[in-house]
Image (cartoon, helix red, strand yellow):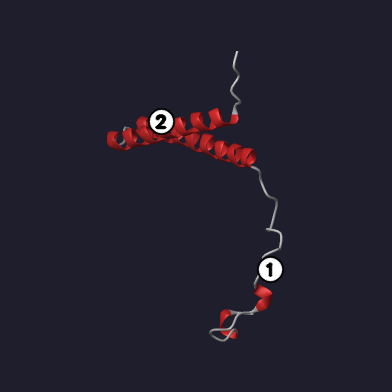
Amino acid sequence: MTDEDVPLGKVVPALIRPAHAEPPGPVMNEEEVLRASLARLREEHADLSTAIEALEERGSDPLAVRRLKKRKLALKDRIAAMDDRLTPDIIA
């Protein structure tokens, strides 16, 4: 059924999910979400390292390199903050 098949102002009941229906796919808890985000940030950090090295080797625009380094440092801070949230505090 396409949008053209549905008259304006009409709702097709088969396309609406009931309020009590289960959400599609598996549901992740907060720790799993944080770990997935952390992995993505670490990958982006590594990609930035590679990009910065390549730009420095070619002698590219120093301003662009500086911006990438600043972004990489901000990522490092976000990674550290997420690590702290995932690591339990141990009081000795």
The residue lying toward the viewer, choosing from 12 and 79, is 12
Category of crowding for the residue at label 1, using alpha-carbon neighbours closer than 10 angstroms: few (below 14), some (14–19), many (at least 20): few
**Residue 92 located left or right of residue 21:** left
Res. 59 mark: none
Q: How many marks?
A: 2
Q: Quadrant of residue 7?
A: bottom right
Q: Residue at x 55, y 36 (%)?
A: 38
Coordinates of residue 78 in the picture (x, y in percent): 47, 34
Assign a secondary structure to mark 1: loop
- State the residue lying farthest toward the top: 92
Coordinates of residue 65 in the picture (x, y in percent): 34, 34
Res. 18 mark: 1
Q: Residue at x 66, y 46 (%)?
A: 28
Picture quarter with the C terminus: top right
For residue 15, above or below residue 62: below
Coordinates of residue 52 in the picture (x, y in percent): 40, 33
Picture quarter with the N terminus: bottom right
Coordinates of residue 18 in the picture (x, y in percent): 68, 68
**Residue type of the residue flagged with mark 1:** Pro
**Residue type of the residue flagged with mark 2:** Leu
Q: Quadrant of residue 37?
A: top right
The nearer-to-camera label among 2 and 1 is: 1
**Residue 35 located left or right of residue 48:** right
**Residue 77 located left or right of residue 28:** left
Badge 2 is on which residue?
73
Give yes or no for contact between labels 2 and 1 (Cβ–Cβ under 8 Å).
no
- Mark 2 and mark 1 lie on one chain; the one further toward the N terminus is 1
Assign a secondary structure to mark 2: helix
